[in-house]
Image (tube, rainbow, N blue to C red):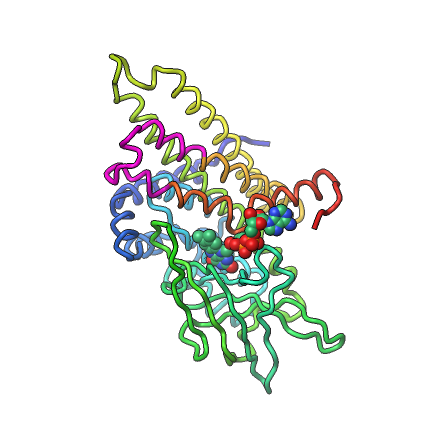
Amino acid sequence: MTFTESPERRQLRDAVAELAAKYGHEYYLDKARGGGHTSELWDEAGRLGYLGVAVPEAYGGGGAGIGDLAAVCEEFCAAGTPMLLMVVSPAICATVIARFGTDDQKARWLPGFASGQVRMSFAITEPDAGSNSHRITTTARRDGGDWVLSGRKVFISGVDEADAVLVVGRTSDARTGRLKPALFVVPTDTPGLEYRAIPMDLVSADKQFELLLDDVRLPADALVGDEDAAIAQLFAGLNPERIMGASFSLGIARYALDKAVRYARERSVFGSPIGAHQGLAHPLAEIKIELELAKLMTQKAAAIYDSGDDAAAGEAANMAKYAAAEVAVRAVDQAVQVHGGNGLASEYGLGTMVAAVRVGRIAPVSREMILNYVAQHSLGLPKSY
Ligand SMILES: Cc1cc2nc3c(=O)[nH]c(=O)nc-3n(C[C@H](O)[C@H](O)[C@H](O)COP(=O)(O)OP(=O)(O)OC[C@H]3O[C@@H](n4cnc5c(N)ncnc54)[C@H](O)[C@@H]3O)c2cc1C
């Protein structure tokens, strides 16, 4: 057992941190406030191989694991340049295609994931199903050799930036007639696919969209892998999603804590730095402890996942995602408090994070659904819903 990261992982972190610092939080805020995207940063990170670290080497990627991709994601967030699409495109979508796609699908999409040239959104959430993904109604029917897909999705991140969307739908089982999940790659320019931005009170460079699929005709090979393997595919995508969600929150927590500590050292009101008052120092120390604990659990989840044990990774990935989201919310709130009035002044860039950091408690899976999971699976308590 080892509790330190490899020299390669540390070098990767340093290199990503250096790139992110070149852009910085002001760049991010300018893009987010102006309705733009962090495309320059994404493209440069892609060219340098950071977005493709976990794509198999055979397709031009780094051949590393989710732990390395999570480290990349964390460093971007810690530098104030969070890229939400990282949780989706190189983590969920590339993982599902690498593990379950046909050879043709891998050849078509993985080199683009490796270089960052491909961006893919992931669409599972539906307005009437919400957290209960068993109730999704987006359905694909066969028509000759094609699939015809219809349904509606909400809160889908980054569709305007994406080349395609990995859509979770359902097909009817030829033997039983029952609906079962199926994943489809839908290029964003496919006729019948429409999307519109959902107005959000978030200052984010990645926007959320409603997706309308009206008899979207897709070729047979739009279905990812085997028609009967979708449950396994979904589960394969869930752990990377939670580990990346955790690393996203960890990075934001680090950013907020660094900013708070710097201010607490510099700002003096009663003749000494405000950080000398335990009323401010102790909450920051608590956040530091909670952050390190959440990071340890995230690294554990990634290590288990990268060792190939999907089932065991589930518990750690859920706990990591929960703990990281909680400490991030606390870190941003305390950073605002430490800054006093400046905490809400635009110049300090913290006010915009108050809503943004709460995303970690809601998506990709809410804190309550994680608590349900732990209550049932870790504690063996009865299911309440
Ligand atoms: C910024 C952002 C980006 C997103 N990006 C994507 C994306 O790219 N792709 C995608 O598919 N989705 C995305 N989502 C959607 C996100 O995954 C959902 O919002 C989330 O899963 C919760 O679903 P819901 O909003 O329908 O809430 P609901 O399911 O309606 O839940 C509402 C509240 O009830 C609680 N609740 C529900 N059931 C239970 C229960 N059994 N026990 C206890 N509490 C319960 C929930 O925890 C929550 O607090 C995004 C959301 C946001 C905010």
**Frontmost residue, 14 versus 166:** 166
Residue at the image point whose x is 59% and y is 46% from the top: 305
Residue at the image point whose x is 30% and y is 41% from the top: 18
Q: Quadrant of the N terminus?
A: top right
Depicted 190 relative to depicted 301: above or below: below
Depicted 343 relative to depicted 155: above or below: above
- Magenta span: chief secondary structure: helix
Q: Residue 343 colored magenta? A: yes
**Frontmost residue, 28 versus 224:** 28
| Residue 293 image position (x, y, % from top left) | 53, 30
Q: In which quarter of the image is residue 231?
A: bottom right
Left/right placement of residue 204 relative to residue 149 reads left
Residue at the image point whose x is 49% and y is 26% from the top: 289
| Residue 251 image position (x, y, % from top left) | 41, 39
Left/right placement of residue 61 relative to residue 237 reads left
Residue furthest to the bottom in view is 144
> Looking at the image, can residue 310 be seen?
no
| Residue 262 image position (x, y, % from top left) | 30, 26
Left/right placement of residue 220 relative to residue 155 reads right
Q: How many marks?
A: 0
Q: Residue 110 colored magenta? A: no
In the rendered structure, which segment of residues is drawn in magenta? 330-353
| Residue 99 image position (x, y, % from top left) | 57, 60
> Looking at the image, can residue 259 be seen?
yes
Depicted 149 relative to depicted 78: above or below: below
Residue furthest to the top in view is 271
**Frontmost residue, 12 versus 93:** 93
